[in-house]
Every structure is written in structure tokens, then in C-alpha cells.
Image (cartoon, grey):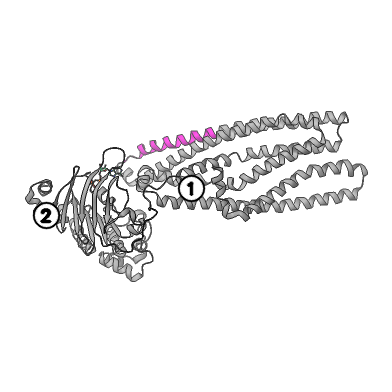
Amino acid sequence: MLRRFFSYYKPYKGLFILDFTCAVVAGVLELGFPLAVNQVVDKLLPAGNWQWILWACAGLLAVYALNSVLNFVVTYWGHKLGINIETDMRKKMFEHLQKLSFRFYDNNKTGQLMSRISNDLLEIGEVAHHGPEDLFIAVMTLIGALVLMLTINVKLALLTFVVAPLLLWIAMHFNRKMTVTFRRMMGDLADFNARVEDNIGGIRVVQAFANETYEKQLFAENNGRFRLTKLMAYKIMAWNISLSYILMRFVTVFVLVCGTFFVIRGEITNGEFIAFVLLTNVFLAPIQKINSVIESYPKGIAGFKRYIEIIDTEPEVADASDAIEIDHLRGDIRYDAVTFGYGEEAQVLQQIDLTIRAGETVAFVGPSGAGKTTLCSLLPRFYDVTGGRVTIDGMDIRQIQLSSLRRQIGIVQQDVFLFAGTIRENIAYGKLGASEAEIWEAARRARLEEFIRSQPEGLETVIGERGVKLSGGQKQRLAIARMFLKNPPILILDEATSALDTETEAAIQASLAELSEGRTTLVIAHRLATIKNADRIIVVTEQGIAEQGGHEELLAVGGVYSRLHQAQFRS
Ligand SMILES: Nc1ncnc2c1ncn2[C@@H]1O[C@H](COP(=O)(O)OP(=O)(O)OP(=O)(O)O)[C@@H](O)[C@H]1O
């Protein structure tokens, strides 16, 4: 883990060397102060040379000034190093999240993932900045102080060092405990965020059901859990700080008592005694430092561990090493003995064989949960088949680069997802960088032009989160306009119009018919009236493809389709 952590320093070697060198020089200068005081008290004071004392003090001031410059560099450039590393980690995580497959998102909550990318990495910059230099300086000052104290008086030094291992052990022990607790706290915070995300995202449902009290209870549970874990973390921190404090003060008093004793016996001079007391503080400083940053270190380490968990999650659907880029597909689709299941449990699709010719419009009908959507999801490789293969134009889709495959397939869903932005941004999502004329042309073909022109802001009209300010029909039209711009040879229409009123549906059906022209189109629909224009109807049941053919043909068979038709006709 340490090696992986340090790999993030690579692009910032120069910055790291600058920060590290300044921090080390500042550390060395810190060690020199007690020795300078020693010289002033023992050599210059008895001589009574006021001028020399002033010169020595001026020198000391110059060194302090240098130290202040070094501290500026360490604080600003060092933090810059930390911030850069934190930013890189966020970027890497975001890029990785873009690659992770549908199944990953099926099993993880949005709020939790948001927490990971924002909160979990908050302290990592601090650790990246202070971690290596603090560790080095701590070891260096410990050893330096140790040597200097030994040179002043061996007996007094050895007596002081007896307590040091105990102090170090306490700091390390509590640090470990804090890392575990902070990791749990981050998990709780992620749950808490997921709860809030769910509630705010579904606030209209909450209020429509008047379930605010129930939601408050759920929130209170998460909030309470988070509070308890946080309290636990601070309890550990309090123990650590108190214990370390009293032990350190004990060391100082101990040195005072023993030092005075040695001075009285004439074993050390007054100057040596003062230097020794100052060195004791230098010696205790690294331990004190560990305590002062006790919050950010374990938090940073815990966050890094959680970060690594995500980075190490392999995308389930990815490009094969020899995958090829395809500019254009004709749209001949074939399902060849396809078997698929979402988990270990029963397969949703078993041994499906199906051929769809380029330019053909096929409609999938069948009972709910039979696997119509699943069958279509395999085409853009949202999930990979567990058995058999899917080919387009004779090529196994796993041999085509994922991005080029998905560029060739357009999907319009019943539950249209729009981004919180303007109409222009949402239409242009179909073809980034589309020209003004192309956007208007797409809007016209999707029969959205009139609506856009009626808005004072036109294309710049803000549509609210997920397009909340638009009607269902307008959202559908926007999704269709986006698809006109994308212009893919293969189209999947997933229950695209089943939520609309008859008139809007008819208008949208007309747009969709235009959109389907010259493309291979797969329609998933419940309303049989909407799919009469299909070249072929495929009836999917839990047992697989039960029937296929034209509308009249299937009615004549008197099977599943005719029963579905009768049921809808009656209703
Ligand atoms: N992401 C998923 N993870 C696990 N199981 C899923 C997932 N999506 C669908 N399923 C299950 O797979 C089966 C087929 O679902 P699918 O959505 O393909 O059916 P459908 O025929 O399109 O149904 P409907 O007509 O109701 O939309 C169902 O039993 C469903 O519970």
C-alpha cells in the first residue's frame, strides 16, 4: 500500500524535493537553537562581552528569519504537493467510475460513491504533504536530540530515554485504533449520504405519501450511528492526548529534578542544563506532532484504503486487448445460443437464438419480467452474456471496442434521464459539439421545435434536475431529438411511449417512426397497438422466445400473443 501511495508523488518529484529539503533544513536548524543558547550562557555570559552577545543574537535572528522562509515554502508548496496528489486521486477515481459496469452500479448506492470521491479523500492531501517529511524529521530529530543529549551528559540522557519507548508505543497504538475507527466512520458517513441522496432524490414521493415522519426516523438512525462512531474516535483521541501529555510533562519535570541535582553536584554546567532542557523539548516534539495531527493521519490512511478498494474493482465489461474500432455497423444482429443471468441464481435468458436483419424493426412483447429489457441490454454490452454470443454484422460484439459499439447504438427509454442544464446541452449530448443548425434540425424532427420557440430563453431554457420542469412528452421528445443527432444505425426503444396520453403518444410514435427509418430497431412495448408497424413481433416468455411473426400471423396461431392481445383488447 505504501508503494502505491508513493507512486502518486512521481509527477511532482521537483515539488517533493523542494518541500522535503526545506522541511529537513528547518528541522536541523531547530536542533541548533539549544546549542546556540548553550554557547551564549556558558561562554559569552561569563566573559561579559556585551557586543559578542548582541552579534550572537543577531546571528540567531538571521537563522530564525531563514527558518521562517523555509516554513513558508513548506506550508505553501508542501500543501500544493498534497493538493495535487488529492486532485489526481479524485480524477483517477472519477475516470475509474466511468469505466465500471452496470452490475457495479446495481450493487452500490449513489450517495455512498459520492461520499467516497469527496469526503474520503479530504485528508489525503494533508497526509501526502506532511507524511514523509514528518516521518523523516521525526526520526532525524529523535536521533539528533538523542546524540546531543548523550554528549552533554550520558547519565541524564539515559534516564530520560527510559520513558521514550512508552511514549512512542502509546502514540502508535492509538494511531492504529484511530485508523480503524475513522474507516468505520467513513463507511457510516457514506451510508448517511446515501440516505440523504435517496430522500432528496425521492422527496416528491416522500411528500406525496406524507411519509416525512418515517423518513425522519430512518435519517435519525443513520445520523445517530454516525454520531456514535465519531464520538468513539474522539474518545480514543482524548485518551491518547491526555496520556501522552502527562507522560511528556513527567519527562520534563523529571529532567528538571535530575538536571538540578547534577548541576548542584557540579556534573554539568548551567548552560548544559538549559540546553538539555531545550533538547528534551526537541526530543518530545515529534511525539507531540503525531498527537497534533492525530486526526488527519488516520483519516487520510483510512480514506486511502477505501479509495484503493474502488480503484481495484475491475470493470466487468471491458475492451479485449485485440478489440477493434468500428466506424459504421450495418446492423445485422444475431443472438447465438445466448444464456444470461444477473447473479448466481436462475438464468433470465437460456439458449436464445434470434436473427434480426439490418434495417428491420422488431418488437418484443411478453409478460412482465420475461427478459425483454435484459435481451436488449446485452447488445450495447451493459452486461456480458454468460453463454453463447451476440454478433453484429457477423462480429462478436466482444471483439468491437466498447466505445465504438455504443456509438452505433441509440437507446430511448420510458424513464428518460436528462441532465440538469439547458435544452441545448441536453440535445447536444447526442453529438458533442453539434452545430446550432444540427440542434434545431434534431428538435424539428423530434417535434420539439415549437415548444422551444415558445420559451423566452429558447434553447437556453433550464430544465431543472432530471428535466423536472418538462412534461413527460417533452422529455421523450428531447430524448428523441438527442437520438436524431446521434444518428446510430441500431436503435433500442424501451417502452418509449407507454407513459403518455394517446394524442402525445401518436405524435411521438410518428417521430419514432421517422427515427427508425433505415435503422435496425428493437422495440420493447407492452401496448400492442404501438407495435403494429413492426416488421416482426417476437414473443418472449420466461421459457425463451415462444413465437415470432407478423401481427395477423401470430393472432392466427392462437398462442401467447393472441392471449395477450385478447387481454389488452378486453381491458
Ligand atoms: N439489474 C438487475 N439485477 C438483477 N436482476 C434484474 C436486473 N434487471 C432485471 N432483473 C431481473 O431479470 C428479470 C427480467 O427482467 P427484464 O427487465 O428484462 O424483464 P422485462 O421482460 O423487460 O419486464 P418488463 O416488461 O416488466 O419491463 C426479472 O426477473 C428482473 O427481476
- On residue 416, the disc is none
**Residue at (32%, 48%) from the top-left corner?**
384
Residue type, numbered disc 2: His
Disc 1 designates what residue? 118
Residue 360 among those drawn in magenta: no
Give how far across and how far down residue 225 sits, in percent.
45, 34
Marks 1,2: beta carbons within 8 A: no
Mark 1 falls on what kind of element? helix
Disc with the residue nearer the chain's start (1 vs 2): 1
Q: Residue furthest left?
A: 556
Mark 2 falls on what kind of element? helix
Give how far across and how far down residue 404 sits, in percent.
35, 59
Q: Residues within 10 Å of mark 1 (few under 14, many from 20)?
A: few
The span shown in magenta is 210-233
As rendered, which of 471 and 433 lies closer to the eye? 433
Quadrant where the N terminus sits is top right
Q: Residues within 10 Å of mark 2 (few under 14, many from 20)?
A: many
Residue 51 position (above or below residue 448): above
Residue 295 position (above or below residue 25): above
Residue type, numbered disc 1: Ser
**Residue at (46%, 50%) from the top-left corner?**
93
Give how far across and how far down residue 484 sits, in percent.
28, 64
Locate ligand 1 by image quadrant: top left
Q: Residue furthest bottom?
A: 437
CA gap between label 1 and label 2 equals 53 Å
Disc 2 designates what residue? 551
Give how far across and how far down residue 526 sits, in percent.
18, 50
**Residue at (57%, 42%) from the top-left corner?**
296
Which quarter of the picture shows residue 440? bottom left
